Each structure stands twice: as C-alpha cells, then as structure tokens.
Amino acid sequence: MRRTVFTLPRGNAKRPWKVAYKTKLGHAVHGDASAFLQDPALKHLRGRAQLLFTSPPFPLRTKKSYGNLTGAEYVRWLAAFGALFRDWVRPSGSIVIEVGNAWEPGQPTMSTLPTKALLEIQEANNLFLCQEFICHNPARLPSPAQWVTIERIRVKDSFTKLWWLSASPRPKANNRRVLQEYSEDMKRLIAGKRYKSGLRPSQHVIGEESFMKNNGGSIPPSVLSLSNTGINDSYQRYCRQEKLRLHPARMPIGLADFFIKLLTTPGDLVIDPFAGSNITGASAEALGRRWLAIEANPEYVRGSKGRFPKPVHRQRRS
C-alpha cells in the first residue's frame, strides 16, 4: 500500500483547531475548516490529497442545528472555499461536493443558490466539471411539507446533486472499482452467447462481442439510488450511550464508498472539511485510505467516534 506522509502538529492554545482523536489511518479534527485549511503549520499536507469529498451545510432558507447559511451569504461563503479545496488536492486529484436543493421562502419554487455556488467554485478556480451525479434517496420523507403533503401541489424532493471537479480534465479514476453485479437478464445473455447486434435507432452500431464479454459487472450510472434508513448502527448506539445529539443530515455511507473507490486507491489521502458525523473517515478507514476529517461542532466530533469499531486515541496535548 502506498502511504501518503501524514502528520499533524500537536495542538496549542493559539491554534484554532485540535485533533480530537486518531485511528490507524486518520485524524478527526475539531475546528473551523477555513482556519484549518489555511494554517501555515499544515503546508506539508497541501497538494497531497487525492480526493476532497464533502457535503457542506445545505443552502436552506431556514436555520438548522448544524449551522447552515442562507441566501446569497451562502454563495459567498462556499465559493470562498474553492481556492482552498484546489490547494489541498493533487494535480491528478478530485473534489466532490454534495449540495442539496433549496426552495424560495414562502412559495413553491426552487432556488438556484446551489447551482450558483457550485458554478462560482468551478469558474473562479478554473476547475473542470468531470461529471454531475444525482444521489436519489427513495426512502426520504415527503418535503417540502407545505407544498407536498399539505397543499399537494409538488412531489417530494428526494435527491441531492454531487459535482465532481478537478484541476485536470483527466484526474485519477477507474470505474472498474465500482462495477455493479450484472442483472439476471445480463447473466443469462452472457451465458447464452446470443445477442442481436447491429444498427440501433440512435445510429450506433453494436457489435456482439461488446456484450458477450464478462467484465466482472456493469458500469454504474450517474444516478445513485441509496437509502439511509438504518436506526441501530454503531454510530447511533454510541451517541445514545453517551447522550450525544445525532447529526441530522447524515449521508448514506455507500455514497462515500462509491467516490472513494472510483477516485482513489489504498494509501491515498481523503479529506472532508465538513465532516459532520465523519462518514467519510469511516468509509476511508474501511477501504484502506488515509483520511483527515474536520468538523466545527464539538458534539458531532465526539459522536463520530462511534463509527470506528476499534478504540481511538485522543491526541496528547503539548
């Protein structure tokens, strides 16, 4: 396994962040993401991450417990991170940002704030948009409630968008690492060695040899369907035991798994500046990647320890 040099200085009273705990492969940091990413003491880590994967607070029109910003203030806040994000990843690295939808206050129309914020990051930092993804949660509760369940004039908002950005038009990636199991029909097709090749309505010519080869699985689409309905995982049990608040906007761990597999290999460094309950760190640890997670809320940092089956160690104070 290739190992990225990964050390953090010990905490002190002047530093606006501290290492809350560490594992065999990663560090969880309590502190402000902007201050951390700009700290001169971390210069040795800039340009070392293969993947920056994060889900910042969404641009909702109402305040939530995890501290989201609203309106144009959100666009300015998130766009300011673009240069920092680019500074921390390798030339062949990737930046993947998940942003949820927003609705205009008091009316059943959607806001363009999420798209504006992402475009600002992409354009201001000369980043390439490698691909756009949709994460669809079929089990998501009907929302916005006023328009969906009360007035019944909209359908439920059940997806978020993810933008895969990079400083290079050809960043490190390999879809063979995220192949899906073939459908039963495809398995029968391969086994039977019979496929009707030829010209399609799209004018593409499909050769029989293209579909008869077993490649170990099918290439996934850019729409990822992932539910997040677990109620008794190690994280939730730990938070209940320690009487800590659960993070209210936890992503499915399968989402982090997908992008970490697609865009990194074992030993690479993965960073999440808005770690929340540290799903990114837990996924990276399980997949043999080194990780660095930053979270401003101390209660969420403490609760995230429950994602790691082995004991974690507190950073000793200097």
Image (spheres, rainbow, N blue to C red):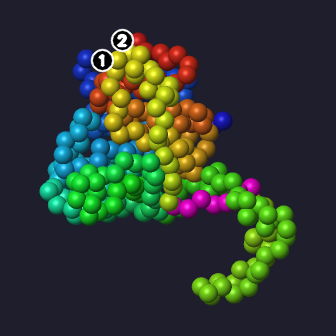
Compared to residue 315, the image places residue 246 above or below, namely below
Compared to residue 242, the image places residue 42 above or below, namely below
* Image quarter of residue 69: top left
Residue at image position (61%, 44%) is 265
Distance between mark 2 and mark 1 Cα atoms: 7 Å
Q: Which mark is residue 318?
A: 2
Name the N-terminal-most of marks 2 and 1: 1
Q: Residue furthest right?
A: 192
Residue at image position (34%, 57%) is 156
Task: Determine whether the residue tagged by mark 2 lies in a helix, strand or loop.
Answer: loop
Residue at image position (46%, 26%) is 235
Compared to residue 13, the image places residue 200 above or below, namely below
Q: Which residues are magenta?
A: 216-222
Residue at image position (64%, 51%) is 177
- Residue 240: x %, y % from top left: 40, 20
Nearest the camera: 132 or 28?
A: 132
- Residue 178 is at least partly visible in this image: yes
> Which residue type does callout 1 highlight?
Asn
Q: Which residue is mark 1?
A: 12
- Mark 1, other Cα within 10 Å: few <14 / some 14–19 / many ≥20: few
> Which residue type does callout 2 highlight?
Ser
Nearest the camera: 268 or 55?
A: 55
Quadrant of the image containing the N terminus = top right
